[in-house]
Amino acid sequence: MRTKSLKKNKINVITLGCSKNVYDSEVLMGQLRANGKEVTHEATKDEGNIIVINTCGFIDNAKEESVNTILEYAEKKEQGLVDKVFVTGCLSERYRPDLEKEIPNIDQFFGTTELPLLLKALGADYKHELIGERLTTTPKNYAYLKIAEGCDRPCSFCAIPLMRGKHKSTPIEHLVIEAEKLAKNGVKELILIAQDLTYYGLDLYKKRNLAELLEALVKIEGIEWIRLHYAFPTGFPMDVLELMKREPKICNYLDIPLQHISDSVLKSMRRGTTQEKTTKLIQEFRALVPEMTIRTTLIVGYPGETEEDFNTLKNWVEEMRFERLGCFTYSHEENTHAYLLEDDVPEEVKQDRAAQIMDIQAQISWDLNQEKIGQTFKCVIDRKEGEHFVGRTEFDSPDVDNEVLIDASKFYLKTGDFVDLKIIDATEFDLYAEPVEVSSK
């Protein structure tokens, strides 16, 4: 029988999945630090003797990664390399009984709303007064600001309501306090996230209140960019676009997952819209804010998706020329409405359809990026990587969009600074640039 390590407890938090999980891990670590605990994030050397895995349970690939990570640390515990392993997050919320049965040597599993209980298991108290206190894990110049939890939408394919519950908005005054603290710590860009930004405020204020929240956030000193992620097309509050148009701090950028465009697929997906309505909405966006970059995501291989449905989608992608687009294959998720349907599109067909969509988008991205050559953009510098400084324009979100690469052997730039960069070359998904009026090395 192995002996427990005698070193001081150090908690290593492992985060899997989306930006909402990143945010949750940061809140957890902020609470632990306030309790005097030694905490680290995804440390590989001296990783700590207590592990907390924040899991994702969204689609098959994410679930597989989460399960493999749990198994990896369960094995390390068996080997005596770590003392305790706790699991939290979406996978744990959704499959706790199965996980407890299949991986019994995990110390404890927690759901997405059980932060106080998780803290107690880690020897810490939940401190209600810590509004906005987080240990951020992103580069110092940007941070995620989660403005709501859960979702009230009835989308047939989505398990998020099962794991995150009903939509619950965070009050404006709490978000302002949080944003002010982030700004004092050097954050210059807020990336607003929620399962559905457009629903913000309906539960608290009995109206869609995203514009009022934005009005409050733009007043915060030190914040230069505010970016909007994960809007829903039905019931989009158009006053947000008026604000985007006149307020320079709000990036001309919107992430709005549309999922499909064939009317029959949209109806089965329970999206509450049609091809005509969606096309009109995008046209309105572009008329109101012509310089806006629109990012969307699509699902192919949904149950019953015919070749005709797919061709409708393909033609629409070519026609709409989205600046940013991602494509996923349908994942058949238990306890969702679509699980009652037959998952009848073969996997190889799903993969081929996704590849076709991304080939179309690669050409669109190439064309749009070529048009940027010779233009100058205000960019933020996120990091230095290899031989380049890596930045972004206001039209690009971290990890998913274009990056702007600057030759570090010729120019010196500081992480977190905003600089004017002239684009000198471009590929489908990268821009190459040189600073305007910055001294070379």
Image (cartoon, rainbow, N blue to C red):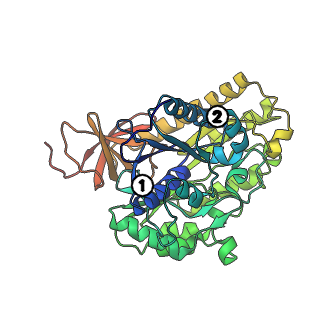
Q: Quote the CA–CA distance across marks 1 and 2.
A: 44 Å
How many neighbours does mark 2 have within 10 angstroms: few (below 14), some (14-19), or many (20 or more)?
Answer: few
Q: Measured along the vertical axis of the image, is residue 356 above or below residue 382? A: above
Residue at image location 60% in from the left, 43% down from the top: 56
Front-most of residues 89 and 11: 11
The residue type indicated by label 2 comes to: Ile
- On the image, which quarter does residue 405 sit in? top left
Give the percent coordinates (x, y) of residue 45. 35, 36
Residue 291 is at least partly visible in this image? no
Q: Farthest residue toward the top?
A: 348
Q: Which mark is residue 103?
A: 2
Give the percent coordinates (x, y) of residue 143. 43, 57
Q: Which mark is residue 300?
A: none
Q: Measured along the vertical axis of the image, is residue 147 above or below residue 11? A: below
> Could you tell me which secondary element the residue under label 2 belongs to?
loop
Residue at image location 56% in from the left, 54% down from the top: 118
